[in-house]
Image: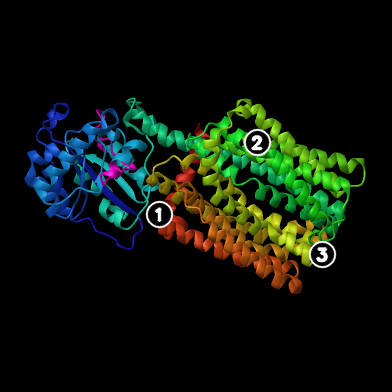
Amino acid sequence: MTMKKHPSRQHRIALTFDVEPPEQAEIKQHAEFDGSAILDELLRRNIKATFFVQGAWVEAYPQLARRIVDEGHTLGNHTYSHIRLIDTPEAQCLSDIAAAEEAIKNATGVSSRPFFRCPQNAGGWDSGIKTMLKAQGYEHIHWNVDTFDWHEDASFEHALNALRRGLRTYNPTVVLMHSWTNLANERLGELLDALKDEDLEFVTVQQLHDEHNTVVPMVYTPEIEPGGLGIMEENDKELAEDTGGQSGKLGKSIAWGAIARGVSVVANFVFSILLARALGPLGKGQYALIQQFIGILAIVLNLGLPTSNVYFVAKKKISPQTAFANSIVLMLPMTLISIAVTLIFLISPFRGQLSYSLPLFVASVVLFVTTMLFGWINAVLIGEHGLKPQGIATIVQSAVLVIGTGLVALLGTVRVVDMLFLAALSQAAGIIVLWCFDPHITSVRAWSWPDFKMMIRYSFKAYLIDVANFLHLRQDILILGWLSTSAQVGLYSVAVSFAEVVRYVPVIISSAFFAEISGYPEREQELRTAVLSRLNVLLNIVIVVLYIVALPVVVPLLFGKAFNASLALTFCLLPGAIATSIAEIPSTLLFARETLYWRLSSTMVFLNIVVNIVIIPKYGALGAAFASTITYMCYSLVIVVKTRNGTGLTLRAMLVPQKSDIEILLNKLRRKMLS
């Protein structure tokens, strides 16, 4: 029987076999299984597969090695003598791999490069082993379905269940089998017959490689093994720790970020609603104007060190104490600069309808100082601990903000300056929480000039990007306040609040993701980027539907009829917000690879300023929304294209959700609920 192929079918499956001489002591009971039975079955069905061959097997069966190539299968290197790379000196590893390559070339006339599989996967997740392999022109090939044909309790039923589970979870599906097992030699045909209703397209690893398909590796856990046995050896546990552990750490970090962001969103909306109802569009606009000014000033004066703090601490290149000390030493000069710049702003025409007062000036400077300190300390802790410290601090900040606003409202008239002092108080509360989480990082004596120079070299381009991106997102409010009225700013700030909700989840994910993947090998970076990016696209689709249904009711209900005009502004901003949201995960991958696109960010800032200045005088807040959406979409398009051109990811891999993405997400949620 020939297994029918369906080129239009999206689900693809690659059968891979690790091929070893059956004469080896550990498998000598299978001495009759040389691999020919597998080739016969595949030939009968016209299925192409991938064989990772051991050099010793090639020398024992050169005619079968030639047959693999002649019959159109893909061939990869599995070392010469099945050594565990993770336990073997590098020189011996290289010698063994080279011996296998020589045997393969002598027997077949072709090279095994670039495909390699570590025996027993001992080293398959180790960055040092992967770097060594890459230098030799190899790429380690993982799998996401293990039939467990090698296991002492192996069974046909368990292999079939593993395959069906893998087909539900992964696309493409890469199957691991072995040349010397009963299952592969005696029941392969029966196994394939059981899958004939799945409507599959069988491919080789070469095809997946040529088409830049993303293969998501499986995670080993005791419950998926035959009988639920926990049989992993010590080095095999690296795989679970490096995938499940890292994935678990990333998941926990994202969960903390999501909890904190959820609390923060609710708190900020309550705060915004109270301000809108107490101050009206004019007062709401004045508060938004000064707050955005402080935010921009903090980004401009932090020199990009928060990004450097996360990057170097996560990669273990700089200690948390040194990263903190190298940041805090700049606090005094930056505070002095902020005093001068804030004074100039409050007496300049750019302040819009703000009136200068000493309390307003003091509140602005205090808010700047607390914002800077929180940003620097928070970045160090993200690099060291993930998003948990930030999550706890954000929850405390939100509580201070909401409770404080309620108390101020009860005590009397709400003023803009009171809200600025309250915002500074909430930042100070966050700083205290971060310090309590890890007081050991606050060592000024750990300052290091060589490390400071290294951080600044990295942070310079990151700094330009941070400044440009923040300006791109925030400068429209300042320009609107300058060229229009504070009432227009108030309406626009409500629309911005709703539009920015679209970016909350991807920003949380990218913050945790950046700290995690900075130390990953490139292939693992791309695998995780593809899945997270596609899930983010799905999330944006859901948000759009919710907004269309809910916003016409929510805006007047919460903010009052005076803010009804914010609804049109929100829908005008929404396409741009979605575009920046979709670009968030790919841009994190570029940052992790030190691809810092400061020229693009700077260009978009300039373009945004020009379009705002041209359109706002005629169309007011609607013009600002239109200008922002146009430049957001241009920026995001370039980011996605740069990611495609600079990595192994295709646009499809990043942007087109797959059925397996939802299944992976549901499976993870199901496991969390069960645990």
Three-letter amino acid code of the residue under disc 1: Thr
* Residue at the outermost right position: 412
Three-letter amino acid code of the residue under disc 2: Ile
Q: Say which residue appears at 44% left-offset and 39% top-offset.
A: 519
Q: Are marks 2 and 1 in contact (CB under 8 Å)?
A: no
- Front residue of this view, candidates 596 and 182: 596
Q: Which residue is mark 1?
A: 647
| Residue 519 seen from this side | yes
Look at the numbered disc 1 and give the secondary structure of its residue: loop
> Does residue 312 appear to the left or right of 298 in the view shown?
left
Q: Is residue 151 above or below residue 539?
A: above
The nearer-to-camera label among 2 and 3 is 2
Whether the magenta-drawn stretch holds residue 147 is answered as: yes
Q: Which comes sooner in the sequence, label 2 or label 1?
A: 2
Look at the numbered disc 3 and give the secondary structure of its residue: loop
Q: Which comes sooner in the sequence, label 2 or label 3?
A: 2
Q: Say which residue appears at 16% left-offset and 29% top-offset.
A: 27
Q: Position of residue 624 (x, y in %)?
A: 70, 66
Q: Say which residue appears at 14% left-offset and 54% top-offset.
A: 71
Whether the magenta-drawn stretch holds residue 316 is answered as: no
Tally the marks. 3
Q: Are marks 2 and 3 in contact (CB under 8 Å)?
A: no
Cα separation between marks 1 and 3: 46 Å
Cα separation between marks 2 and 3: 38 Å
Would you say the magenta stretch is mainly helix, strand or loop? loop
> Which span of residues is magenta-colored?
133-156
Q: Position of residue 306 (x, y in %)?
A: 60, 42
Q: Which residue is mark 3?
A: 485
Three-letter amino acid code of the residue under disc 3: Thr
- Front residue of this view, candidates 400 and 349: 349
Q: Position of residue 113 (x, y in %)?
A: 22, 48
Q: Is residue 311 above or below residue 470?
A: above
